[in-house]
Image (cartoon, rainbow, N blue to C red):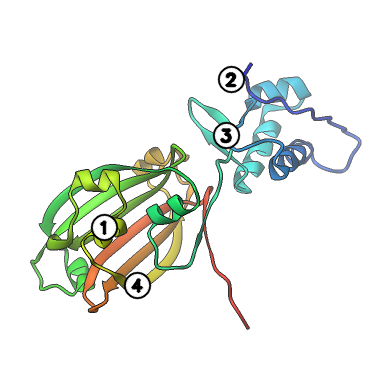
């Protein structure tokens, strides 16, 4: 049946030197990496696998943990274990995530979590080059790709450049700026990594404490006016930045 989980044909050989969890994880990894198990495929749960293969449940759990750490599967409460959705590889260019997803043929979708006008915190005012106590638009969005949550994006922008919450639901921020004839010319980006906070894990369908990629960006237009300060977090399990370097 279409909704039935995939049951891998795995043979356990206790005479082999490889640990039992490796004998489970490696065949599954090969199926996933070869494309035989496509993204989104649901795999049988650890309890069923342990009983079927006559191994302990901790052994089956460790096999799944190995696959999770390698970014090959994701595990979600109420859904189970699935082959990781198609990874998003993003080049190291000054582009928006919305534009990159569209360019790669994916279907970006946005939920606006917060939208307010507030007094800029000192660090935000400094990043935007604004006087202290200036008002800024502050919005936070959940960006989806192929109906999978991908990133939580938090931005502060000058009020006169801010799109409405409705505009943010239907288009990307940089696309909106282009409609205003604002050209994003240069940006400074800083990448790091940390563990997901409980609210972030819930929004991104990741387990508590999952690894997240973080990016802080300050971007300017052609006149060197700072037009955004952003702090974004991405699911490390399905998202990566890549660039080419030369000697």
Q: Earlier in the sequence, mark 3 or mark 2?
A: 2
* Left or right, residue 75 beside residue 101: right
Give the residue pinned by disc 1. Answer: 155
Which numbered dot is residue 40?
Answer: 3
Q: Nearer the viewer, mark 4 or mark 1?
A: 4
Q: Secondary structure at mark 3?
A: loop
Q: Is residue 140 above or below residue 22?
A: below
Q: Earlier in the sequence, mark 3 or mark 1?
A: 3
Q: Position of residue 98 (x, y in %)?
A: 38, 52
- Which residue corresponds to the image point at 68% horizontal and 35% vertical from the top-left? 37
Can you say which quadrant of the picture contains the C terminus?
bottom right
Q: Earlier in the sequence, mark 4 or mark 3?
A: 3
- Which residue corresponds to the image point at 61% horizontal and 31% vertical from the top-left? 41
Residue at mark 2 to residue at mark 1: CA–CA distance: 39 Å
**Which residue is the extreme one toward the bottom?**
247
Q: Earlier in the sequence, mark 2 or mark 4?
A: 2
Give the residue pinned by disc 2. Answer: 3
Q: Residues within 10 Å of mark 4 (few under 14, many from 20)?
A: some
Can you say which quadrant of the picture contains the N terminus?
top right
């Amino acid at each position: 049946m279409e909704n039935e989980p995939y049951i891998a044909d795995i043979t356990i050989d206790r005479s082999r030197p490889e640990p039992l969890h490796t004998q489970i994880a490696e065949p599954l990894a090969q199926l996933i990496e070869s494309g035989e198990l496509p993204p989104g495929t649901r795999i049988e749960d650890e309890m069923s696998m342990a009983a079927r293969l006559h191994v302990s449940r901790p052994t089956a759990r460790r096999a799944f943990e190995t696959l999770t750490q390698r970014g090959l599967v994701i595990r979600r409460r109420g859904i189970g274990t699935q082959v990781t959705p198609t990874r998003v590889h993003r080049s190291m260019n000054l582009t928006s995530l919305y534009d990159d997803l569209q360019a790669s043929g994916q279907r970006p979708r946005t939920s606006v979590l917060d939208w307010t006008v507030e007094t800029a915190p000192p660090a935000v005012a400094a990043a935007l080059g604004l006087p202290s106590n200036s008002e800024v638009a502050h919005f936070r969005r959940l960006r989806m790709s192929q109906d999978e949550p991908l990133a939580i994006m938090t931005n502060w922008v000058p009020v006169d450049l801010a799109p409405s919450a409705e505009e943010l639901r239907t288009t990307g921020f940089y696309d909106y700026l282009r409609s205003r004839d604002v050209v994003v010319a240069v940006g400074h980006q800083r990448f790091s990594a940390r563990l997901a906070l409980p609210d972030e894990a819930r929004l991104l369908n990741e387990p508590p404490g999952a690894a997240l990629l973080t990016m802080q960006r300050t971007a300017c237009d052609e006149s060197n006016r700072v037009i955004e300060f952003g702090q974004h977090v991405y699911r490390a399990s399905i998202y990566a930045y890549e660039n080419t370097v030369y000697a």
